[in-house]
């Protein structure tokens, strides 16, 4: 399988590049990111996809753990956000 890379934006403004394949799930990518960042409380964070390029409003789409990354980002920018869902205004999604 050919690995792809995706850019993940963190809440503090940093970005990380992660490699994934067509068979990689959101949960696997999240676990890889957790290992890279040395986080221990993974259940407090989630991955979101930016879904509207060129818009003045940032629209984020929640990614479920069981989703394949390749399908989850098919209609999004190749950019993910790693955030604490409790810090997100539900009316902005």
Image: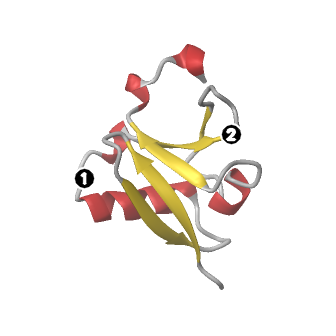
Above or below 66: residue 29: below
The location of residue 29, given as percent across then percent down, is 48, 61
| Horizontal side of residue 34 vs 91, given as left or right | left
Local secondary structure at mark 2: loop
Location of the C terminus (image quadrant):
top right
| Horizontal side of residue 13 vs 54, given as left or right | left
Observer able to see residue 88:
yes
The location of residue 62, given as percent across then percent down, is 58, 37
Disc assigned to residue 80: none
Say which of marks 1 and 2 sits in front: 2
Residue 78 image-quadrant placement: bottom right
Q: On the image, numbered disc 2 is attached to which residue? A: 51
Please state which of residues 45 and 65 is positioned toward the viewer in this rendering: 45
Above or below 7: residue 54: above
Which residue is situated farthest in the bottom direction here?
A: 1
| Horizontal side of residue 60 vs 27, given as left or right | right
Please state which of residues 4 and 24 is positioned toward the viewer in this rendering: 4
The location of residue 77, given as percent across then percent down, is 66, 50
For the residues labelled 1 and 2, the Cα–Cα distance comes to: 26 Å
């Amino acid at each position: 399988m050919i690995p792809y890379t995706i850019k993940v934006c963190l809440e503090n403004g940093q970005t990380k590049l992660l490699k994934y394949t067509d068979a990689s799930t959101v949960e696997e990518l999240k676990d890889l990111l957790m290992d890279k960042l040395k986080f221990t409380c993974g259940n407090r964070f989630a991955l979101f996809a930016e879904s509207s390029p060129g818009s003045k409003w940032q629209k984020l789409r929640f990614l479920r753990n069981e989703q394949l990354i390749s399908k989850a980002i098919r209609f999004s920018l190749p950019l993910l956000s790693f955030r604490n869902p409790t810090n997100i205004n539900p009316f902005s999604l």
